[in-house]
Amino acid sequence: MSRPAASDTPRYMNPYLAGVLLGLVLFASFVVTGHGLGASGGLSRIAAAVTDVVAPDHVDRNFYLAQMAGGSTNPLDHWIIWGIVGTLLGGFVSGLLAGRVRPEVRRGPRLSVPVRLTLAFAGGAVVGFGARLARGCTSGQALSGGAVLSAGSWAFMFAVFAGGYALAYFVRKTWN
Amino acid sequence: MIVRSRSKRKSGPRKSPPARRQAESKAESQARSTSKSQAGSKVNPKGAAALFALLAAFALMLVGLPGSEARLARLEPELNRQLASREYHIDPGELMDLMYNNKLHLFVIDVRDEVDFNLFHLRDAIWKPVVQMSAECCRRLRAEGIKVVLSNDEVRAEQAWKHLTANEVLNVYILAGGVNLWLDIYKDGLPGPPHEAITGVGDDTLRHEIDSALGHVPEFALPPHDLVGRREYPTKVKVARPVAVEGGGCG
Amino acid sequence: MAPLDLSTLSNLTRILIAVGLGFGFGFCLERAGFGDARRLAAQFYFTEMRVLKVMFTSIITAMLLLFWGVALGWIDYAALWVNPTYLWSGILGGFILGLGFILGGYCPGTSLVAAATLKIDGLVFVLGCLAGVFVFGEVVPGLRGFWEQHAFYGRLTLADWFGVPAGVAVFGVMCLAVSMFWGAEKLEAIFGGKARGGSS
């Protein structure tokens, strides 16, 4: 089978089917561990771990960082770190099976690579900030909290869509 | 479009014998390109799945979820352990400090009977006798705020605490020593035992003589502000901290 | 009774469980096409409503299974982690996350999947996330009162909020999801049909 060009449409799974499978994983997580999935909390812990190496006193004086890494607490000793490891592996294996693992920059047709990467970094920073402000991201809050009917998680989810749609018009040239 | 028709073919119900397959597939593609809701044999899989999901949810609504009695029975051992360790019993001094703390919402819930409540109760106390507590009452209390339940000693307050906690109401505490101890300290001016010595032992009857229905009028319903901090106690109320499942949430 | 008591298991077993669940998570995300920023962004231009479909389907699948488990007495709902509701930090944080989502094209989980399949923009996004959470950590002490106490409702569910039994809330969410799917299909037909070389 010839390697598909980047602009070709890969054969992704039916979204409803993928949703059911993801729902099963989510369900399994609750049944086995009592909690759902997550991602942003792990990134927060990684950042805290790095900060703790460079400036441990600063970590101890900051209530948010101290919760994770104060004193001799190891911020990486948490299930979510291993969850991230698993997520990377799972994404990689799925991509490998489908021939979708190759270095590239996914970007809108009108965007150059440097601009795209700058936007990716900036977008990531905004997302990271927002996720910790909300105490979770789409996986930790929207999916997990949503499934157990947490009111705050549902409010969060609608706010995410609101934010995305609000800005979409202004950045339409970067995607279309 | 490719993905959609693939899913339709996957969930197609019947297997046609080889002889008719060609004619059949032609009919299939015709059916696909026309309306999805053709009368008869062609079932829209998405519609079917959606209907199934709705029915499952509807059935769940009819079946209902286990009531609070079942929950209480299940949680009882752990709740009893917490009561025995007295980690949720707060000192009268701490309650008074909470009453003067403007930064948080405080709900004082008096779970005694109406007679005792009318004789005397704390300023702004809510009357909710423990026998009348249902799952309904707990819904309104589930919002933010510290709830302190009290009775004359601790018997009914502990019952109420268990009921509320089992119904997932957060931040519920018990007044150690109850109204009897409160009146000892703030009406009779006694120093009261040190916090660790408060046992709350008693049959939950009002020990103090109150001749008429004073309600919350007397000064000791909300002792004067200069008494704040006079009594030493270990702080037990943790403000605005949800009870977290171990390691739960997004970190 | 679920959730299971994992305290008797070894550390290694618990690590493997976390990795396994993460693996399933990442695998499904990649299968769904969420390792690709263009697919994710398409949601906000109505050309492809994958994000909505996958998210809502996964939520209702897990929700139905969980609550049926509770109804049958197999799952203890009180022992499940229900994200506490901090209403305004959640809404504000969610809105900000949405802004970043359409700006950068990913959310934290999907960016990990993208990075895993060697999408450079995904990797850069992850680095951006690390920067963003770092900034948050530095800023949050100044916001502590707001972040820790404002509009904190504790373990508040939709059932509590609307004053209905949990079963009714589940049914309500199901109706919402199905109508959103119906709407999504319609929008895709209208906007996605303006083909830009097969964006399905």
Image (cartoon, coloured by chain):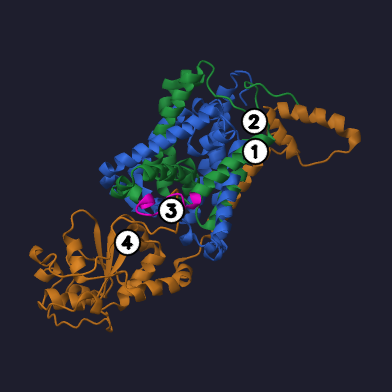
The colour with which the image depicts chain B is orange
Compare residues A33 and C120 and report the one nearer the observer: C120
Residue C159 numbered tag:
3
Q: Where is residue C108 in the image (x, y as percent from the top left)?
A: 48, 38
The chain letter under disc 4 is B
Distance Cα–Cα, label 2 vs label 1: 8 Å
Residue A100 numbered tag:
2
Q: Dot 4 corresponds to which residue? A: B171
Residue B138 numbered tag:
none
* SS at badge 2: loop
Judge if badges 1 and 4 mark residues of a common chain: no
> Amino acid type of disc 2?
Arg
Q: Main secondary structure of the magenta part?
A: loop
Q: Is residue C155 magenta?
A: no
Q: Dot 1 corresponds to which residue? A: A94
> Amino acid type of disc 3?
Ala
* SS at badge 1: helix
